[in-house]
Image (tube, rainbow, N blue to C red):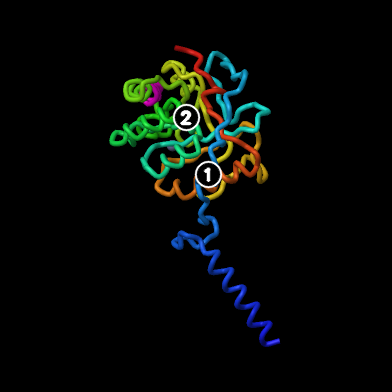
Amino acid sequence: MGAGTFLLAGCGASVASSDQPVDSASPTKASKKVDVASLGTEMRAEAPGEVNAPSETGGLPPVVRSIKTDDKVVFLTIDDGVSADPKVMDIIRKTGIPVTPFLTKSEISGSKDYYKQISEMTGQTVQDHTITHPQMTGLSADGQQKQICEPAASYTDWFGAKPWMFRPPYGEFNKVTQQAAKACGMDYIVLWNASLPKAYIRYAQGDKLKPGDIILTHWRPDLYKHLPRALKDIQQQGFKVAALQDYLPRRTQ
Ligand SMILES: [Zn+2]
């Protein structure tokens, strides 16, 4: 009896110690490391044969929260641009995932080279997320237009392609935003229906991904810790990451 108790305790202790997360700063199992190499190089979905992109409604760019598709694909959009982290670039390079950057101009003046590299490496155009990340609905028509047009012009210079998707900060917009977006050459207002706020994916509904989900996350200092696990989740649910611009192609020039 005494020996049995000892053995059980010893076994439990040994399992517990070998199971310790590599990053001991975070107490939850959420930080348990996923080896990027274990994800392989097949996480990027092939381009679809044909797409049925949403068209303008009432002469204004459509608002897109998810993509209508039967393909087992999801889309990863990464916003703002505060943290230009080489570790995140490394994960993107190793997995080949075509992430879509929605960048805030005022956040990236010191890290243009980083985002240019991300764009070239993934083949994805840098898209528009305003100059200063304001609440668009609180601005005048002129103010809204400046917030959309100015980054579009700068990004054309900096990254070699004009954006055609606009994401309003906080997902807040009104009809004036749609009009301003159109005036700046935007073909789509792109929102999201799932997110990666920290370690785990927050689903649109229930606890699973659906084909066409658009996942929002941010260029933030802890993204490198959580991105591999999120990609593992995506993979284990049988999904790949597709290029948003394949499903929302540029309409105007
Ligand atoms: Zn943002």
Q: Nearer the viewer, residue 160 or 171?
A: 160
Element at label 2: loop
Res 134 label? none
Res 167 label? 2
Dividing the picture into quadrants, the one containing residue 44 is top right
Q: In the image, what residue occupies the spot 49% across and 48% down? A: 226
- In percent of width and height, residue 35 lies at 51, 50
Residue underneath mark 1: 196
Which amino acid, mark 1?
Leu
Which amino acid, mark 2?
Arg
211 to the left or right of 77:
right
* 137 relative to 209, above or below: above
- Counting residues from the start of the chain, the first of labels 1 and 2 encountered is 2
30 to the left or right of 183:
right
> Which quadrant of the picture is home to ligand 1?
top left
* 48 relative to 33, above or below: above
Residue 242 inside the magenta-drawn segment: no
* 134 relative to 49, above or below: below
Q: In the image, what residue occupies the spot 54% across and 13% down? A: 59
Q: Which of 206 and 123 is in front in this view?
A: 123
Q: In which quarter of the image is the C terminus?
A: top left
Instruction: Write down the region rendered in magenta.
Output: 141-149
